[in-house]
Image: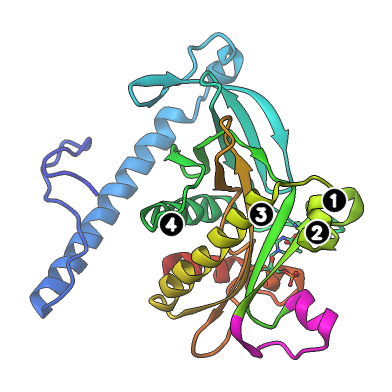
Amino acid sequence: VQRPGSGEDGIRHTACQTVGGSKTNINKAAFSRSHCDTIRNRKNALKKYCFSDPFGLISQYKNILPKKSIYHGGIAMQKLEKLYEGKAKQVFATNDPEIVMVHYKDDATAFNGLKKGTIAGKGVINNQMSNRLMAYLEKQGIPTHFVKELSERETLVKKVSIVPLEVIVRNIAAGSFSKHYGVEEGVVFEQPTIEFSYKNDELGDPLLNTYHALALKLATPEEIKTIEDYSFRINDALKAFWLTCGVTLVDFKLEFGRLSDGTIVLADEISPDTSRLWDSKTHEKLDKDRFRRDLGGVEGAYAEVMQR
Ligand code: TMP
Ligand code: ASP
């Protein structure tokens, strides 16, 4: 959104906002949109020209150029060393020991990394969608790791130690549930169901029950109770949210972490990588199953569900 008269192109222009409602407003919105497009095109051309680095100066001197500062709560945050790289994200330290920076990649894997690929633009969508959903959940009283979105792919989050449990909540039979228990995909449960797997790539994330989790000392009984309680509340909130977008929340996977004081917060991401999202009317899959099952239209599905 361009503020009135603030254009870097030197042209005074009015705010570009989508205006809903009456016919006149729709025309106004269409005009504003095309006006925005013109300005955006000019800006992009300018950016391309300015940042094309024709003499290779930026790459030559990038190590001695001052690093761009990102401010959070009035403090300049620095992106420091990489702490961890997973299948879809990288995590960097910052100068605040309680905060890390997540970078979302376009890399996609399935079947414990056996199938590899990229989904163009996925990192941008997952970053923005996960942040919006976490902000929404915070408003519903669920503590999350989300702090601040920095860019299309980067977000500041609270540093946690991940509880090595993948929590899966299901409303409708699909995926491994259908396979394990011989239930046709699409059968709606009378009440949501929850399951845990041990977050351990070497073992292939085996399913376990809460007694196993206690025996393996993955979490305390109180932590498991909190995680279960949050997970069902998250399901209620997300199901209601997606319904307003014409999307049915079939199932999803959550991960929780401990802050330095031991508080349990929702961590990792909530995205089409980690949720099954079906069009409510057509039941078309708008999630990573399109990649897992080679259904095609993967990028389109991510874009569609983000737009909704
Ligand atoms: P499943 O039916 O294959 O067990 O998947 C259940 C949900 O968990 C589904 O929404 C996809 C998500 N999921 C992940 O986020 N990560 C994984 O590694 C797997 C296997 C599933
Ligand atoms: N996280 C899975 C993997 O291990 C992918 C999936 O979501 O199915 O590759």
Q: Which residues are magenta?
A: 175-191
Q: Which residue is painted at 47% across and 68% down in the image?
A: 238
- Residue assigned mark 3: 224
Q: Which residue type carries mark 4?
A: Leu
**Which is nearer the N-term, disc 1 or disc 3?**
1
Seen in the picture, residue 277 relative to 144 is either above or below; the reply is below
**Residue 211 - label:** 2
Confirm or deny contact between disc 3 and disc 4 (CB under 8 A): no
Q: Which residue type carries mark 2?
A: Tyr
Q: Determine the image quadrant of residue 224.
A: bottom right
Confirm or deny contact between disc 1 and disc 3 (CB under 8 A): no
Q: Which residue is painted at 47% across and 64% down in the image?
A: 306
Ligand 1 is located in which of the four quadrants?
Answer: bottom right
- Residue assigned mark 4: 137
Q: Which residue type carries mark 3?
A: Ile
Of discs 4 and 1, which sits in the foreground? Answer: 1
Q: On the picture, is 133 further left or further right than 249?
A: left
How far from the left and from the top, in percent, is residue 24?
8, 75
Seen in the picture, residue 252 relative to 178 is either above or below; the reply is above
> Callout 1: helix, strand or loop?
helix
Q: Which residue type carries mark 1?
A: Ala
